[in-house]
Image (cartoon, rainbow, N blue to C red):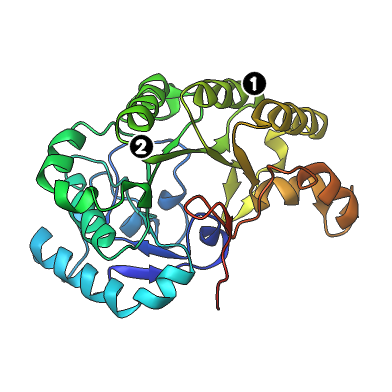
Amino acid sequence: MKILSKTKGNAEEYGRWSVNPYIGCSNGCTYCYLKSGPSGKYLGQNKPVLKKGIIDDEHAFYLAMAEILENRKQIHKDGGVFMSFVTDPMLEECQRLSYRIAAECVKYEIPVTFLTKRLAYYLDSAIEEYQNLWKLDNTLVAYGFTLTGHDELEPNAHDNRARIATMRALRRATYFHVWASIEPIIDFPSSFRMIQQALDAGCEHFKIGLMTKNTKVCRDKYDVSECLSFIQDVMVATKDKATVYWKQSVRDFIGGTPTHRRFSDKELHKILDDYPHAVSKNWSIFTQSNLHTED
């Protein structure tokens, strides 16, 4: 059973390698992509469980590190590992193992990116437990929070305001990199408020995407003019404060369908990319530059 995965498609917009010892999630998000499609019954479980074939966390740790170190050279080139695509790595059942794998990666100078809707309740004890490893270079850890501004759609997750407070604490107290996933956008005003609050908390980077179903944008949920205004507002608000990556879902929606194009590629570039702080999917928060990846 593999724990390390080479990502494909839209998942590459978050990371090219992911660590996934657990599947399933108890956050209960109504928009969860894991619950849809043919694998939804397996991946969309309402409680995190170790993948089949993994005995316990100790077994998972050694399997994960064996796979990571085997691919260490390419993982370095690709910007590190992402935790995780099939659960929230900060759920109570998952976070000790998540921290342990992350700390071991830091020991080998492998960057680690988290994405969560949870608070790091055990962060202090985890850092103390692995303090010699974290102290090597905790700038190799990027801590990200999903922010939608709609707590009612994430009933078992910690509320958005608390996530932002944790972002502020992490940035000030531990010097981890902090970033935000503004995806899915439920409505543009809520997402813009989240961006403003995250900027105030020291957020360095935003990945911004629309709601999709089976990788296709839910076009009927959004208004084009509202989306264009939102893009302009975000680029003004984040100037000189944070970098922004517009996910493919935004590009697909603004560009239009293949048979009914709204904008040419040149016009789309002008709308989304013609800013010093607009970055590509290969940009790294750890190097502040584009990665030289290999397929």
Residue placed furthest toward the front: 136
Q: From the top left corner, tell me how far across and down residue 248 is, in percent.
A: 67, 53
- Give the quarter of the figure containing the C terminus: bottom right
Mark 1: few/some/many CA within 10 Å (<14, 14-19, 20+): few
Residue at the disc numbered 2: 175
Q: From the top left corner, tell me how far across and down residue 251 is, in percent.
A: 73, 49
As displayed, is residue 136 above or below residue 277?
A: below
Where residue 129 is drawn, which disc sits there?
Answer: none
Residue 63 visible in the picture: yes
Q: From the top left corner, tell me how far across and down residue 151 is, in percent.
A: 42, 23
Measuring 22% from the left and 63% from the top, which residue is drawn there? 51
Residue at the disc numbered 1: 189
Compare marks 1 and 2 and give the one earlier in the sequence. Answer: 2
Measuring 18% from the left and 40% from the top, which residue is drawn there? 92
As displayed, is residue 120 above or below residue 105?
A: above
Measuring 16% from the left and 64% from the top, which residue is drawn there? 61
Amino acid identity at mark 1:
Pro
Tell me the quarter of the picture where residue 276 sits: top right
As displayed, is residue 2 above or below residue 252?
A: below
Mark 2: few/some/many CA within 10 Å (<14, 14-19, 20+): some
SS for callout 1: helix
SS for callout 2: loop
Going by the image, does 213 lie left or right of 52? right
